[in-house]
Amino acid sequence: MEFKNFSPSLLRFAIEVELQNTDSPEAASMIAMAKLKEDPKYYNTRYGFVEPMRKAQDAQSPLQKLLDGNARFAEGKSQNKNVSIVQRKEVSKGQKPIAAIIDCSDSRVAPELIFDQGLGSLFVIRSAGNVINGIEIGSLEYAVDELNIKLILVLGHTGCGAVKAAFEAHKLDTKDKELSDIIKKIKPAVEYAKGITNNTETVLAIAAHKNAQMVKQDILKHEFVKDKVTVISGLYDIVTGIVTTDAEKMTKAKKLIFRKFYDEKFKKYRYKRVK
């Protein structure tokens, strides 16, 4: 049974459940898929998962539009054909993107495709390892002040070459200052991941996730986003095609099912099902 047999909302839920027992999004994804293949109703019966019923206004939110588009993409049912001559003429008059995406330059991670969006829908800033500096921050400020952007998503991804370069920095000849700058930005995320596990594949997955979170925190330090914009981080799985975001853990449905608590034995936060 392939992952396409399961809805993206179920897969996201399952991955988030398994993330309570591992810090690796990639490992959580593999564990979730293994359990679903053995028992497709595993997360329904054990954790009370039900397909979400969204209100009409929720479906119109920028984040929900992105998640809905990603669901179509992950299922192989992309439908956005908003690249017509008519649309091209329309956006030539001005742009009204629904969100700004800080994304990696990796050719496999194209936001317009991943989120099934058309011309003029996304304000995209791409760099290796989705790192930011003055130029990227200036671009975001323009998006917020001039385009009235209300959502910024920092999107990392599994299989990131920039994260791998930071992990293997000791092997690389980084005489070029520009490449060294990218590695220095990502290195703290790699060191964080190394402190959790010594498995290379898991380290890279954790580091990609942590790096996106660190970039989000850097953005939140700037005045132009305060009280104006929602800033979230996310991770794109290049195998399943699914994007998971930190915002999804705060939905009302999840709060009814799980309660966060500190596990003294393992010295980490976990989630307990609320009956």
Image (cartoon, rainbow, N blue to C red):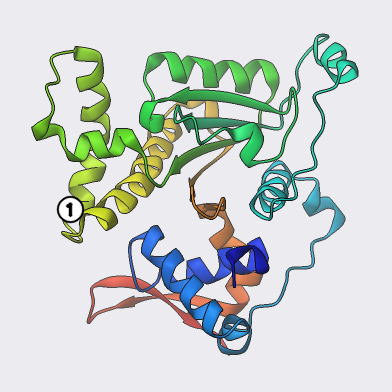
Q: Which residue is mark 1?
A: 194
Residue found 65% across the figure and 36% down from its top: 113
The residue positioned farthest toward the right in the image shown: 86
Q: Tell me if residue 188 comes above or below residue 35 in the rendering.
A: above
Of 78 and 112, the residue lying toward us: 78
Residue found 79% across the figure and 67% down from its top: 53
Could you tell me which quadrant the C terminus lies in? bottom right
Of 30 and 226, the residue lying toward us: 30
Q: Picture quarter containing residue 101?
A: top right
Q: Picture quarter containing residue 66?
A: top right
Of 60 and 5, the residue lying toward us: 5
Residue found 26% across the figure and 39% down from its top: 164
Residue 228 visible in the snapshot:
no
Residue found 64% across the figure and 63% down from its top: 4
Residue 44 location in percent, x, y?
A: 63, 83
Q: Is 179 on the left-hand or right-hand side of 160?
A: left
Q: Tell me if residue 272 comes above or below residue 77 in the rendering.
A: below
Q: Give the secondary structure at mark 1.
A: helix
Residue type at mark 1 is: Lys
Residue 72 location in percent, x, y?
A: 72, 51
Residue 240 visible in the snapshot:
yes
